[in-house]
Image (spheres, grey):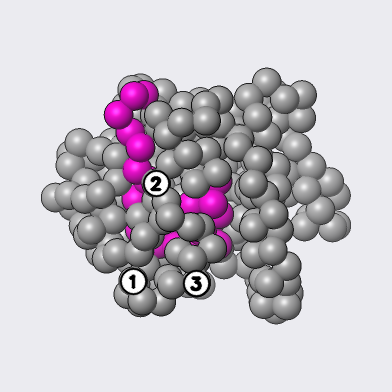
Amino acid sequence: MHPDAAPPAVTARFSARRRRVRHQAELSTVKIGNSDTASGVGTDMTTVGLIGSGHIGGTVARLAVAAGYDVVLSNSRGPETLKDLVEELGPRARAATAREAAQAGDLVVVTIPLKAYQDVPVEPLAGKLVLDTNNYYPERDGRFPELDSGATTSSELLQRHLPQSRVVKVFNNIFFKHLHVLARPSGADDRSALPVAGDDAGAKAEATAFLDRIGYDAVDAGTLAESWRYQPDTPAYGTIYSADPADWEREAPADAAKVRAALTEATR
């Protein structure tokens, strides 16, 4: 199961339920973050740029707007194709090109297929926090020998492509519907956690603050080299947020202890 590219049987259900998911998102008006103002990560980060606005990107955008952020959306098909999503999100959202979203974002979410990672604009992301949601799916992306051998991880590839950015791996291990419905205010007993990995401690701290504002705790999973611990076919991937693996679309919270245990159980 993949949050953005599910198996064919699941994909068939996505289209039938897409309208209901949108309706649920429109009904979700409660502010998740700790503040009613758009203070962002720290005091000066108020805008989230999105390179890719599919299932995960659109869900992150909804959560960010609910938490008081402005969002700048982009995709590979052009800003005009995002009209419906922009209208749904309201005045805090606008559509742009990928380069414009990279320039506008105080933090930027890259949520595109791995095979397109070299299309991510480099210069406008210099110095910025980049949240990488991607996973490696050979049937979609083609073969990457260095990933097949375990010599590197997909997020390390993105970090190499963006040498002056601060890449943090997050959002890749959760089904987009679960990401939407499991968001909770800080301190809630049933709050879920998401793993984060990165080579820059400050970047992970900023990512953790962003997650807190949009409704999640964070578990430090180590460096980007350790991010394989919550990639596909690991205990922390996908069904950890499901009530029943046989009915994985029915969500269930996964707190920090549960996520931490799953990361520890991962093997190659």
Is 138 left or right of 23, judged from the image as shown?
left
Residue 128 occupies which quadrant of the picture? top left
Q: Nearer the viewer, residue 94 or 181?
A: 94
Residue 62 lies in magenta, yes or no? yes
- Residue highlighted by disc 3: 84
Q: Residue at x 76, y 30 (%)?
A: 190
Is 9 left or right of 38, judged from the image as shown?
right
Residue 25 occupies which quadrant of the picture? bottom right
Position in image of residue 22 (x %, y %): 65, 64
Is residue 221 among the parts visible in the rendering?
no
Mark 3 or mark 1, whichever is nearer to me: 3
- Residue highlighted by disc 1: 79
- Residue highlighted by disc 2: 70
Q: Residue at x 67, y 71 (%)?
A: 18
Q: Nearer the viewer, residue 176 or 244?
A: 176
Is 81 left or right of 44, judged from the image as shown?
right
Vertical position of residue 69 compared to residue 95: above or below: above
Residue span colored magenta:
42-63
SS assignment at label 2: strand
Position in image of residue 41 (x %, y %): 39, 29
Q: Amino acid at mark 1?
A: Pro
Q: Nearer the viewer, residue 260 or 216?
A: 216
Q: Amino acid at mark 3?
A: Asp
Vertical position of residue 30 compared to residue 2: above or below: above
